[in-house]
């Protein structure tokens, strides 16, 4: 489960980075 959580966190970070690049995700 820890491994899954780590992957999910990485995916969330990747999405946040995409949002920042698009300028639609600040915070």
Image (cartoon, rainbow, N blue to C red):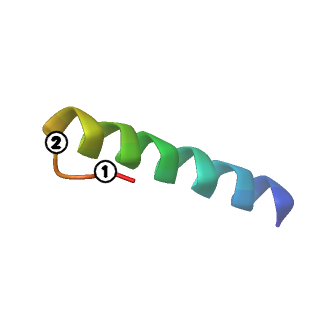
Left or right: residue 20 versus residue 15 is left
Q: Residue at x 39, y 53 (%)?
A: 27
Outermost residue toward the front? 27
Residue at which label 1 appears: 26
Residue 18 placement (x, y as % from top left): 28, 39
Left or right: residue 10 versus residue 22 is right
Outermost residue toward the right? 2
Q: Residue at x 38, y 47 (%)?
A: 16
Q: Quadrant of the N terminus?
A: bottom right
Q: Which type of secondary structure does the marked residue at label 2 adopt?
A: loop
- Residue 3 numbered tag: none
Left or right: residue 14 versus residue 21 is right
Q: Residue at x 61, y 53 (%)?
A: 9
Residue 6 placement (x, y as % from top left): 72, 51
Q: Are marks 2 and 1 in contact (CB under 8 Å)?
A: yes
Outermost residue toward the top? 21
Q: How many marks?
A: 2
Residue 22 placement (x, y as % from top left): 15, 39
Residue 4 placement (x, y as % from top left): 72, 59
Outermost residue toward the bottom? 1
**In terms of image quadrants, where is residue 2?**
bottom right
Q: Nearer the viewer, residue 23 or 7?
A: 23
Neighbours of disc 2 within 10 Å: few (<14), some (14-19), many (20+): few
Residue at which label 2 appears: 23
Q: Is residue 5 above or below residue 10?
A: below
Q: Which type of secondary structure does the marked residue at label 1 adopt?
A: loop
Q: Nearer the viewer, residue 26 or 8?
A: 26
Neighbours of disc 1 within 10 Å: few (<14), some (14-19), many (20+): few
Q: Give the Cα distance between marks 2 and 1.
A: 7 Å
């Amino acid at each position: 489960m820890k491994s899954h959580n780590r992957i999910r966190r990485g995916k969330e970070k990747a999405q946040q980075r995409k949002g920042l690049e698009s300028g639609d995700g600040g915070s």
